[in-house]
Every structure is written in C-alpha cells, then in structure tokens.
Amino acid sequence: MQVSALVLAAAVSGAPAVDDSPAKPGEWGFRPEAGGVTLVTPPGFAWRPVAGAVSYDVSCSRQADFGAVGYAADGIEWNVHCPSRVFEPGVWYWRYRARSKDGEASSWSQVRKFTVAESATAMPLPDRAALAARIPDAHPRLFLRPEDLGELRRRAREDLQSLYTGLKAECDKLVERPPPTAEPPKYPADMERGSDPWRSIWWGNRTYTIAALNGAATLAFTRLLDGNRAYGELARRLLLECAQWDPRGATGYRYNDEAGMPYAYYFSRTYTFLHDFLSNEEREICRGVMAVRGEEMYRHLCPRHLWNPYASHSNRAWHFLGEVGIAFHGEIPEADQWAWFAANVFACVYPVWCDEDGGWHEGSSYWSSYISRFTWWADVMKAAMGIDAYDKPYFSSIGYYAMVLQPPGTQGGGFGDLCAKRTSASNRQLMSVLAGQAGNGHWQWYVLAHGEPQQTGGYVGFVRGALPPVEPRPPLDLPSSRCFQGTGQAMLNSNLLDAADNVQVIFKSSPFGTQSHGYESQNAFLLYAFGERLFIRTGYRDSYGSAHHREWMWQTKSVNSITVNGKGQQGHSQSAVGRIGSFVTTGEFDFVEGEGAAAYGGALRRFTRRILFAKPDVVLLHDLLEAPEPATFEWWLHAPVEMTVAGQGDIRVVNGKAACQAAFLWPEGLEISQTDRFDTPPRPRIKLVEYHLTARTPGKQEAVQFVTVLRPHPSAESLVGEARLQAVEGGFGVTVPVGSGGELCVLLRGSGERVSGLGMETDADVLALVRDAGGQPLRRFAATSGVLSR
C-alpha cells in the first residue's frame, strides 16, 4: 500500500516514481548489490529505468542516514553511472532518484549498502567531455594513435619485419585478386527462416562482407606503414563501393546483424586507416553511411542493453558501435554519444555471463568467440581512451577459465553450445592474446604447452607484435580445481599440467538458468579422463533453434542429470535456475554441491546433488530428491561409445585410453535401459551416434536418494574389487578399493542431523577417510553445505 501511494502521489504531481522491486530474470539488477563487496573503485552503479525520467541523480555516503554526502552526481542520462573518482575502501551507502523533463524529482530510492574492498582496483571513468578529449583529433584512432606511427614504421623494418612481410603478402594477393563488392542478396520472400538455404545466405553475407571490408582495412593499414599507393587506391575503391550498399538492406544491422556488425567495424577501421588518402567528398560519403548504420545500432542497444543485457549478439554489438564512435569522433554528430555509451557499458554492464571470478555461462566456444572479439575493444579502448580492460577483476583472471576447464591435451570443451568436441588447443590463439595483453605468466605457460604462441595475424597481429614478451610460469602454485560460482560451474581436476594424467569432473548448477547458449540442465556433470571423454552432454547443433536443438539438446534427457516422471527441467529458460551452495578443494579431495529443484517448475521440492572427488580414483555422487507427490525418477548417463551393462552395480565405458565403471549403489532394483537413438535426431547431414542410459526407480515415491560411484581408470589397467554400500544410522556408508590394497571410506549424511557407521561419526554432509592396506588412516576430508572457497 505504501508503494502504491507513492506511485499515485508521483502520478498526481507529475514526478517520476522509482521502482525498487528486485530484478526479474533477464534483468541486470541493482549494482552494487545490497550488502555486496566491490573489487573495483568506484563501482559501476545500475538501477531499474524509471518511466518518464529524462535524467537521474546518484548520492553516496559513508553514513546510512546520509548525514554527510561523500559523492553526488546529477543530470545522469541513463540508468547507469560510473564516477570519475575512486571511493575509499570500507562501507558505503547509495541511492538514486529520477527527474522528469520539467525537472521534478522523484523520492529517493531505498538505500543500499556496499563495501569497497581494501584490494579494490581503481577504475574511475572520466566524464564524457574528458573521455572524448582523450580520443585523438587526427587519424588513425583505432588500435593505434597518430603518434604511434613513427615507431611502428621503424619496427616494421626491424624486429616486426616478419609481420610486416606477412601483411605485404596479404595485400599483394588482394591487389592481384580483389574481393567482389556487388551488394549481397536479401532472403527470398518464400524462404524458410533457419533452413539450410537460409543459413547459406545469412552466414554467406557475413563472410562476403568481411572479405571486402577487412581486405580494405588490411590494405589501408599496410599503406600507413610503407606508403604503398596501390594499396591505398584499392582500399579506397573497396571502401567506396561497399558504401553504396543499402545501409538497411541485406547487410543492415537489424536485417542481418551477422553481416551488419562486421560491416560497421571493418568499414570504420578502413576509414580511420585511410583518412588522409580520402578526399573531403569521399569522407562525407563514409560519414553519411555510418551515420545511418551507427544510429540503427545505437537505437537497438540503448538504453535497453543497460538493464536487459543478456541478448547474446548485443554483447558484442555494443563495442563494435564503440569502434564506430571513436573512428567518427567529431565527424558524425552522434559519434561521441556512441563512444560514451560503449564506455558506460564496459564500466557498468560488462561482462554479463559471469561474475568477477571468471567463467562464461554460454560455454567455452562462445567465450572464445566473444572474448576474442572483445580483445579488439581492449586494444582500441586502451589506445584511444587510456582505459586498460585488464584492470577489471574479471579480465585479470579470465585465462584461468581455460586452464581449469581444459588442461593441455583435453578433448571436450565442457558445457555450452558448440563445445562438445573442442580441444584445449582450440584456446591457443585467444590465450596467446590474453597472455600478451595482460602480461600473465600462467596463461603464457598454457600457450607454450600447446606449441608456440599463435599470432593473431593481419594488422591487429602487427600492432600486438609490439607488446613486450611474457615469461611463462607453470601453474604449480595454483589449485587444480576451481568454482565459478557466478556462472554456476565447478571444474574438478586431479592434474592441471597434462590431460593425459588428469581426471576431470565438470559440474553445472547455474543462476543464469538454461538461457542463451548455456542451455544444459542444472546439476548435470561431465567426466573426462586421461585425455578422453567418458560421460558427456549429447547432441549436435545442426542449426540454432532447430527441432533437434530444441527438443533434445535443450532438454534434461540430453545430459547427465535426473528427470521426474519422464519430464525434465524448463528448457532454454532464464527461470530454470540452479545454485552451487558448497565448494571445497584440497590436494586430495574436492567437494561440490548444487541445488536444482527450482528448474523443474514445481515438479520437485528438492534436488540436491553432492559430488565428492577422491583424486584421481573415485567420483561419488549423492543425490537427494523430494517431489510434492509420488513420482518416478530417471537418472541419465550418456557416453560417446556403447556402455556394457552387467547390472546396476557394474556399468562400464571404454573410450580410447580411458575407461570408467559406474555403480548405482542405491536405490536397489533400478530399471536400466540403453539406446543410441535421439528422440529428435539432427538433420541428415549430421552423422552422430551417442549412447544414452537411464536408471529408473521401480515405483513411485515422494523422496528418493541415489548413491552412485564412478571409478575412472586407464583402459589398459583393471579395477580391483568393487564399491559397496551399507545403510547406516542417518545416511549411507560407502567403501571403495583404492591404491595398492587401500580403501576409501565415506559417510554420506541423509536427512538426519548426524551420520555414523564404518567406525566414524559426523554431522558433516560428507566425511571421507582413506586407509592403507593395513587399515591405517592416510587422509581425511569433511565438507558441509554452505562452505564456498574459490
């Protein structure tokens, strides 16, 4: 009633009314979060947009009652703001209000408390005028500044000569065989969207555009180094002929953003590299084209992206618009607005698919794709604006995601679209860039573990070649396992140095739900061992949103998780959320716990999955499920090759150098079945065979617990003994043979307060003890819900 009264009063007075309701799925949320700790100073502020507002005020104080204001800003255009000065470490409070076009102010929002960490990195954002003043008035402006040219020309004759020679060879090929520049076609009216012929035009227009305009940018940049007039003439011809394309036609951003985005940034790069070679009339033609294209991008992105930033393509479009803004600074009236918008996105609303500790919800394939292109913006932003992306906490640790997800030699890229067959070598080029830009020795070691650093190539590679060398540093000082809690993924490894000697469990329970390209269900796991994939996520994306993609890959039955009455979690939904509630890692043991019941749309009250990894021999899963009414439960297990089933306690998979036994120790009487069929197969051009096993409870019940033991081992070796389970007071006791006559003893707490058995007792969720062949204790480990370490 109080909120309604405030809204009514605001409506009567004409003042806008703030809305402090919590963020909904798909919304960025109030930042800094109430009670949160920020690792950058100042933080980037964000709040819910207010209807009818034309500007905002922000106020910050060290006192909850705002007795003394420590920072204030007014006239803020958007619902985000990053101050131009640092905040001192310690507790702060913030609030905002909105103003109407007549200047009437809303009431202040609720007060939110946050803490600036003692170790926070200083990243103030200069105000708009100061930031624009940093951009050079002269050209070039992208990747380098006019004052950098002399040094780069010198180095092209000396230490960067091999890179320069490569650029010349590329330009000579373009001169010999220039790319076509006829405007590409639109889709026929009767063509089915998403069909293979549609895809051919959709993606074909992208590659066609890149060939023409990146070719032009390469010619224009190389001319800057050596003055080759032939390169400049061809670059100008390509640029001006592409300028004749309809800006809202086949390569328009809204018509086909996969063609429209590269048009925008490659056109802008060519323009700034070629600026001195163009006549005033030719420059005006270019400005006219990019005024239309840039404004179309801006109107699509701003202000929507500042509060609803989870549209996948928008998370690269914003920094491509930033390149356009910098290239045409002072030449297109709106260009400075585009650059300012991009700077605010970076400061306040990026990156979105993770938190500050790393990871990437959409998976390693999209991480590689999007971050590779973001590194262009990191170069551009540093050169033009003096802002170092690697000062931001996420980017200061970004490369560790690849290192723990795919130790050198790993086959398989974890969860996410297009990740199934990625190898660790797939990361070499991006990690080469990240190591060079950040100067990180661990990341450089990872690169060298796959061979020499992989150059970016082209003019971007030439500019990056001027970076200082990085000394490699083996990850001997790093934990082998890591939890990316914000992304809801944990990577458990026995060895970071070499996948051939590593056993890895990847676990997902994500607050991002199953949206976008991170569609796999919650509480799913993967098992890789000795460089091979053993238990996997299944399917192959034949086309985004195809029947196979929607009806198999977006469904729980495609991953190693659990269905209820044959039905899984909400597919491809922001609401199908999970949460990692506990993670502990040591040299000998890892433990992770996820909760996934919320993803089932009311079909479950509880789905807690606990995973204990006794490195490297045993992976023990304990699942606790509760439904509102009696149900059957199906435990899914998938492999790239057929599994041999001797009973629920002896299911085996062998793939190359790796093998694993899976034993369903509890409940008894499971109905086991296996098939190599997809309910909805991929399109005929995709040839894929994978195996899907279900272990179904024999009857309906409201609550069930599963206890499952996985024993990975080299396929050339044989397992000794078998895993055993006994019901004990308060839970289960499990014993598994390990080592040379040793034994792993584990207590799993069920619904009681304590569990006792096997000569042990605990109130922890898991208690593990390794005994040698003589029964003497060697290693002990305990873990409880709610304990999180990174």
Image (cartoon, rainbow, N blue to C red):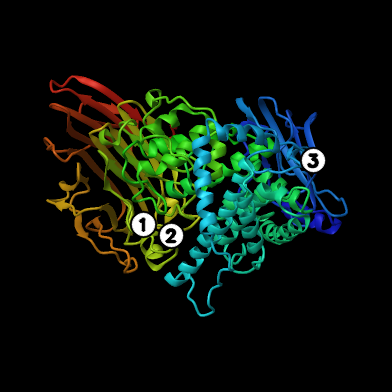
Q: Which secondary structure, mark 1? A: helix
Q: Which mark is residue 129?
A: 3
> Is residue 79 visible in the rendered structure shown here?
no
Please name the residue that numbered disc 2 is placed on: 571
Q: Quadrant of residue 745?
A: top left
Amino acid type, residue under disc 3 in the picture = Ala
SS label for mark 3: helix
- Report if the CB atoms under discs 2 and 1 are less than 8 Å apart: yes
Q: Mark 1 — residue?
A: 556
Quarter where residue 14 is shown: bottom right
- Distance between mark 1 and mark 3 Cα atoms: 51 Å
Q: Cβ–Cβ below 8 Å for labels 1 and 3?
A: no
Return the mark for residue 724: none
- Where's the N terminus, which quadrant? bottom right
The residue closer to the viewer here, 577 or 168, is 168
Check contact, mark 2 vs mark 3: CB within 8 A. no
- 772 left or right of 754 in image: left
Look at label 1 and name its amino acid.
Thr
Q: Position of residue 373 (x, y in %)?
A: 54, 47
**Between discs 2 and 1, the one toward the N terminus:** 1
Residue 389, how many percent across, how many down?
A: 60, 36
Q: Residue at x 27, y 40 (%)?
A: 531
Q: Who's the residue at 52% across and 28% down the image? A: 439
> Which comes sooner in the sequence, label 1 or label 3?
3
Question: Which quarter of the image is occupied by the C terminus?
Answer: top left
